[in-house]
Image: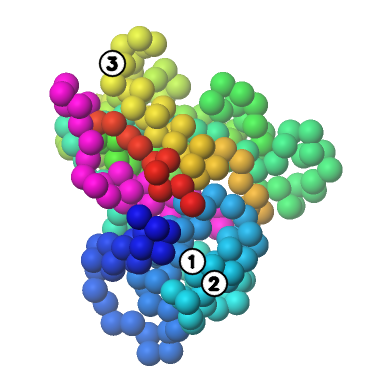
């Protein structure tokens, strides 16, 4: 499949999945076009400048009404709630884990004023970072059903509301970082290292996001745009996992893949 055919089919799938509403009569880009651009931005894994330059040079024929760069990304930020249409459904078992995202190199933070720094220093993914912490809740197929993001200096227990929200729908497996002394959610099961190795599916998810979407290091300097980038990344991951149907082996284990869609 050529990149052009991929982008056209991506738009068609997005248009089918979004709820139908009346478009604003002055809008130059439809909601489906905006979400498609947001998904391409997340999949490309580049900066806003580089993505917009790539878009103008290669695909202006597919998006003839493309607005100016800053206006485009403001609209992507405004419409990021539309990505909720791509979240997966809860299943009996699920997995929750967190992932550190660098927003500033630790050595450079001393040169960056606090008012310009949106990330915090914290311990995530077995290393010290200055940035944010993305937490995702996946179902048994590896699809993301919910997510949240906070600064890197918070504990994983701050993400337990994601678990509480699916109480009665999903039993959530987690590591010791999510253990809380009191008021532990009833549907949370803490697993020691070596237990429930199916949890490693979420590590595959994080690896794919790191390698294909380049999520390990981001350049966003405004928190709202950081959230926007993550929202479209979650949406494009779920959509592409189901592109050709979910892939299961003979043991019923889902195998995640994203590399063939790399731009």
Where is residue 11 shown, x and y percent of the image? 34, 66
Most frequent secondary structure within the magenta stretch: helix
* 10 Å crowding of disc 2: few (<14), some (14-19), many (20+): some
- Which mark, residue 72? 2
Mark 2 or mark 3: which comes first in sequence?
Answer: 2
- Residue 170 in view of the camera: no
| Residue at 21% in and 45% down | 245
Where is residue 118 shown, x and y percent of the image? 65, 48
Q: Foreground residue, 107 or 157?
A: 107
Tell whether label 3 touches label 1 (CB within 8 Å).
Answer: no
State the residue position of label 1: 76
- Which mark, residue 196? 3
Tell whether label 2 touches label 1 (CB within 8 Å).
Answer: yes
Q: Foreground residue, 16 or 175?
A: 16
Work out how far the residue at label 1 is from the one at label 2, CA to CA, in angstroms. 6 Å
Disc number lying in front (2 or 3)? 2
Where is residue 142 shown, x and y percent of the image? 29, 35
**Magenta stretch in the rendered image:** 224-253
What is the secondary structure assignment of the residue under circle 2?
helix
* 10 Å crowding of disc 3: few (<14), some (14-19), many (20+): few
Work out how far the residue at label 2 is from the one at label 3, CA to CA, in angstroms. 44 Å
Q: Relative to residue 36, is residue 163 depicted above or below?
A: above
């Amino acid at each position: 499949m050529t990149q052009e055919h991929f982008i056209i089919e991506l738009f068609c799938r997005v248009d089918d999945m979004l709820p139908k509403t009346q478009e604003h009569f002055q809008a130059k880009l439809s909601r489906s076009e905006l979400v498609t651009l947001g998904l391409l931005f997340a999949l490309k894994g580049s900066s806003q400048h580089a993505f917009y330059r790539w878009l103008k040079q290669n695909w202006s024929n597919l998006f003839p009404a493309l607005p100016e760069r800053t206006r485009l990304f403001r609209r992507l930020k405004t419409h990021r709630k539309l990505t909720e249409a791509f979240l997966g459904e809860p299943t009996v078992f699920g997995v929750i884990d967190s992932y550190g995202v660098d927003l500033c190199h630790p050595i450079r933070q001393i040169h960056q004023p606090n008012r310009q720094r949106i990330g915090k220093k914290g311990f995530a993914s077995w290393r010290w970072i200055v940035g944010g912490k993305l937490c995702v809740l996946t179902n048994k197929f590896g699809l993301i059903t919910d997510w949240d993001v906070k600064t890197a200096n918070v504990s994983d227990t701050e993400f337990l509301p994601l678990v509480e929200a699916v109480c009665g729908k999903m039993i959530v497996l987690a590591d010791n970082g999510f253990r809380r002394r009191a008021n532990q959610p009833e549907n949370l099961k803490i697993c020691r290292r070596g237990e429930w190795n199916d949890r490693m599916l979420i590590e595959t998810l994080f690896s794919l996001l790191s390698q294909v979407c380049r999520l390990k290091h981001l350049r966003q300097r405004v928190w709202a745009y950081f959230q926007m980038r993550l929202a479209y990344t979650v949406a494009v991951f779920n959509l592409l996992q189901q592109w050709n149907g979910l892939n299961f082996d003979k043991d019923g284990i889902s195998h995640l893949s994203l590399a063939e869609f790399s731009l």
